[in-house]
Amino acid sequence: MKKSPNHKIYEDSISHWPEDDRPREKLLKYGSEHLSDAELLAILLRVGVTGMSAVDLARFILKETGGLRALENWDPEELYKIHGLSVAKVSQLKAAIALGQRILSEKKRELGSVYSPQEVFEFIHPQLRDLKREVFKAIFLNAKNQILEIHTMSRGTLTASLVPFRDIFSLANRHASTNVVCVHNHPSGSPEPSREDVRTTRALVIAGEALQIPLLDHLIVGENAYYSFSESGQIDAFRREFNQTLERL
């Protein structure tokens, strides 16, 4: 779609919103995880155009380009054709994307690789040892066991019903991860697994096998020790159980 010849700035729309709904204030108060892609993009755009707030314009851009991942691959010449995108706005978008790529590249180099439960424990233990409630994290690895990303998936007492299985494997796909390691802490200091921990691990293994994104391990982190479902042989046992079930179908 071509830019409108009447390309006036529509400045006052978002400023009239309740403060907690304004993207910039929302970002500073609650953090980026509470903003949609369109809201984050609107902060970069700063203002909209006639008849569109910055958020409306951001939604329109994402719809036209096919989303954030697709937006990254659009050339400036293509972006100029989208209603509301000036040279300045395209430059801002391209600069933000480039910065994000560089941060991700540096982060990946810092994260390194893990090849054993002990290495996972040494890496993650400082983040979990002093927490007063359970935190469940997913570590996404590539085929070379390099850490691609780490996400906190849930907080609070771990139960199979509260672990966001769909989100874990959706994120694995997004990061092109070939393996997943899950980790959670026991604030009591003892890493011994509960029955619920075992049930959760079994469900994770089955989901991973079904989606062909294997769960390599599930670690429970205690005060100064860990429990590995892989080292205990339970990951392999759950995997065999899944494969035997498939063979009987």
Image: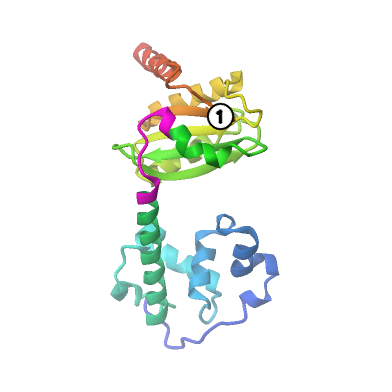
What residue is drawn where x is 39% and y is 26%? 209
Query: Looking at the picture, how far across and down is residue 76, in whole percent?
Result: 31, 74
Of 64 and 243, the residue lying toward us: 243
SS label for mark 1 = loop
* Quarter residue 66 falls in: bottom left
* Quarter residue 53 falls in: bottom right
Q: Is residue 7 depicted above or below 119 in this figure?
A: below
In the visual, does 41 lie left or right of 223?
left
Query: Looking at the picture, how far across and down is residue 74, in whole percent?
Result: 31, 66
The image's colour scheme reads rainbow
* Quarter residue 155 falls in: top right
In the visual, does 33 lie left or right of 229?
right
Q: Is residue 106 depicted above or below 128 in this figure?
A: below
Q: Is residue 244 depicted above or below 56 in this figure?
A: above
Give the residue number, with chain letter if any, for mark 1. Answer: 224
What residue is drawn where x is 42% and y is 77%? 89
Q: Is residue 92 visible?
A: yes
Q: Which residues are magenta?
A: 109-119
What residue is drawn where x is 53% and y is 26%? 225
Q: How busy is the neighbourhood of tag 1: few (under 14 within 10 Å), some, or many (20 plus)? A: few
Q: Quadrant of the N terminus?
A: bottom left
Task: Report the label total.
Answer: 1
What residue is drawn where x is 44% and y is 78%? 84
Residue 117 sits inside the magenta stretch: yes
Of 63 and 137, the residue lying toward us: 137
Query: Looking at the picture, how far across and down is residue 194, in whole percent?
Result: 60, 20
Residue 143 sits inside the magenta stretch: no
